Image: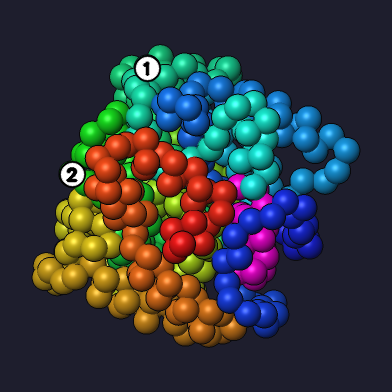
Amino acid sequence: MSHTDRTPQTPTSGGAAALPGPQPPVPATVPTFGQEEEFFVVDPDSRLVAPRAGDVLEAVRARFADRPESGARLGVEMTRFQVEASGPVCRTAEEMARGLAGARAELGDAAADRGLAVAATGTAVLGDVAAAPLTQGPRYRAIADEFGALRDSHAVCGCHVHVGARGTAAALEAVNRLRPWLPALLALTANSPFQRGRDTGHASWRRVSWGWLPSAGPPPPMDSPAQYGRAVQELTASGAALDRRMVYWDVRPAPELPTVEVRVGDVAATAEEAVLAAVLVRGLAGVPAPSPGPADRPLRLALWRAARDGLEGEAYDPATGDSEPARAAVERMFAHAEPALAAAGEAASAAALLERVVAAGSGARRQRAAYARRGRLSDVVDLLVRQTRYGLAATEK
């Protein structure tokens, strides 16, 4: 993903509309942004995850051999259970909405060509991904060899939001602005309550299992590129990370792009929720946060509470030590980002989208509701596949 100026392509496949009404042009001073999404490949008959990512991508290439794709790059992840869509660089939320919906439609249609489906969920609802078969490549093999059973932490699906930031110093400034809001972002995007056929008791089990990796978690407070360099050097020298790319902080300067990258969220259940998360991240990156930011220990506690409770439970404020409803924490986050949302001309549409998401319930809540109706996890998988392809409309019928 290169955050140089270019015109995003319009998807040729249908998908969910993410923002209501026409959107005004975004001023040139507002940074570009983009998003990467990971999905599980699913057998629609058994509802088990299937190690057939390669088949889906072959079908994508066959489908689009004679016409352009959405502008998203569709590719593999570490395990053969997963596929990834890296969207185009965008200036507006509407551009992102089209790109995300188009990429999801392309993947869904291509998977159907091979008798498969794709599901946007942070963890595999049905099927065992332990010691998952790896996608070919020396890097993935090196990670598996070095970290043993911790390789299983990679068999999860998240979303990565990128916001343009020129230089390490600018990216670190954005990191510090985003750190206090990581728990609220996680609560909003929580979408992984089930794994291997059981309810984990957490709204985001992906966040818990990803956190087992020694280079994951919230970044330490950093005020300079030199501090950042020392923190990365410690991780690589200790063996906790193979290299800079394996510094898996919840928010970080992207190792190969001129962006700040937020990695805290589960893959969004719908394209609309993915757009909402991206718009909020771009807004928060543009508004100064209170200084000093939260210390490492209370921030980790707040992230665990967000992973357990999600949007419908309680939130722990790492700055004050107080608890409050998670929805109130999300509303505070939105209010903090609102000046930057207004500067981009997207405050009203983002507020309407947030209201719609809150009314529908978080991805985790919807998964549990689908299971509660008949006690069948197959119903959960079916909901995930519909939401991935058709968006919030699939939940509102």
- Depicted 367 relative to depicted 110: above or below: below
Prevalent SS, magenta region: helix
Residue 274 position in % (x across, y down): 50, 58
Q: Residue furthest front?
A: 374
Q: Is residue 382 left or right of residue 8?
A: left
Q: Which residues are magenta?
A: 88-104
In the rendered image, the vertical position of residue 297 relative to residue 55, given as above or below: below
Residue 273 against residue 125 in the figure, above or below: below
Secondary structure of the residue carrying numbered label 1? loop
Give whichever of discs 2 and 1 has the lower sequence position: 1
Secondary structure of the residue carrying tag 2 is loop
Which class describes the residues within 10 Å of circle 1: few (<14), some (14-19), or many (20+)? some
What residue is pinned by disc 1? 131
Q: Amino acid at mark 2?
A: Gly
Residue pictured at 49% horizontal, 76% vertical: 350
Give coordinates of residue 49: x percent, y percent.
44, 27
The quadrant in which residue 284 appears is bottom left
Tag shown at residue 201? 2
Q: Is residue 390 left or right of residue 239?
A: right
Residue positioned 64% across, 47% down in the render: 105
Outermost residue to the left: 322
